[in-house]
Image: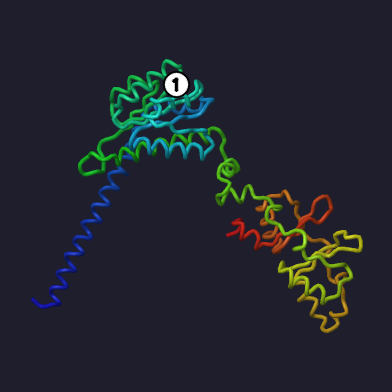
Amino acid sequence: MQTQEIKILEGQRALGFSQEKMRALRDAVAQEVGAMALLERDMPESAVVLLDALMATTGKIVFSGIGKSWLIAQKLVGTFCGVGVSAVGLHGCDALHGDLGLVQQQDLVIVISKSATGIEFEYVLSSLRLQGVRTALLCCNNGPLCGYADIVVQIPFERESCPLNLAPTTSSTVTMALGHALAVAVSSARGFDKADFARFHPAGALGRKLLLTVDAIMHKGDTLPFVGVNAPFTDIMYTISSKKLGFCIVRDEQNAFVGVITDGDLRRACNVGPAVFEQCAADFVNTNPKTIEPRAMAIQALEVMEKYSITNLVVVHDGDIVGAVHIHDLVKAGIKG
């Protein structure tokens, strides 16, 4: 067989293997997509009961599980907290050895167990019932634990995407999806909005936009480009160039705010020719510049700059100049991408 023919056959085999692998991936995903569609179509009525309980809870939501269910519980804790619903995690085994003291009577405990089995949670749920704590169970099967919880949400489930129908795959996906749906529904009912989201995610992009104030990023003190009202053209040019903010702030003899001169103002002033060197700040200062308060949101500064097509603002408080902010400062802070 010729070398070229061998290469063609090898390529065909490789392509066949590749297509087989792609089919395997798609089949697994299709299995989970089908499970999600089943959950949407056959959402158990008890999920609404659990949602009502979540909305009525005045304490915290306590998620618990063992094994893979514990990993789901931890993720749902993060999701609920992220949308403003106070939640904590309690491992099922730890609950048996003192950590059950974490739970208060006004809390709601949600146990996650695919099979609805486990002697650990029989003890835990029994103890919580004696304490008058309301409990719920998220499961995929009708097991012994269903008789121990106040609310049982049995998620519609047919099989795992695992070829052996053993590894928690599809069951984990639908349980997580239902948990996310509950979190979203509760937060929406409580009127959770962007400002609330920013408070719980202060380091995120939205948090910076909604929480960062002008005084946190503004230039102040010796970094400010001040010139006097009688400053000559060369002094103005030097100040704008050396301070690197693209403008200067003009003050009178009493240090009162007069206005600003931008590098654009300087270029336009040069249209008069060499006579510009005989002019001073008072000849071309803009006495009606845009200003902003130091406690204003940084996003507001950006909105003003974009509205008036400017790149800087003087920061003023009670008539005093306290700083300056440039659009580059907003970019560095992540306010403008």
**Outermost residue, right side:** 253
Determine whether 3 is above or below 180 in the image: below
Outermost residue toward the top in this view: 130
Say which element carries label 1: strand
Residue 123, picture quadrant? top left
Which of 130 and 149 lies nearest the eye of the viewer? 130
The residue located at (52%, 39%) in the rendering is 83
Q: Position of residue 330 (x, y in %)?
A: 64, 58
Q: Nearer the viewer, residue 254 or 152?
A: 254
Res 10 quadrant in image: bottom left
- Across and down, in percent, residue 291 comes to 77, 56
Q: Looking at the picture, does residue 140 appear above or below residue 1? A: above
Name the spot of residue 110 as percent of width and height, x first: 41, 28
Placement of the N terminus among the 4 image quadrants: bottom left
Residue located farthest toward the left when viewing the structure as drawn:
1
Callout 1 crowding tier (Cα within 10 Å): few <14, some 14–19, many ≥20: some
How is the structure coloured here? Answer: rainbow
Q: Residue at x 55, y 50 (%)?
A: 204
155 sits to left or right of 331: left
Image label count:
1
The reply, left or right, for residue 85 in relation to residue 2 is: right
Residue at x 76% of width, y 76% of height: 267
Q: Position of residue 47 (x, y in %)?
A: 40, 29
Quarter of the image with the C terminus is bottom right
Residue that label 1 marks: 134
Please tell me whether residue 296 is drawn above or below residue 337 in the rendered image. Answer: above
Instruction: Identify which amino acid the numbered label 1 is placed on.
Output: Arg
For the view shown, which residue lies furthest in the front direction?
97
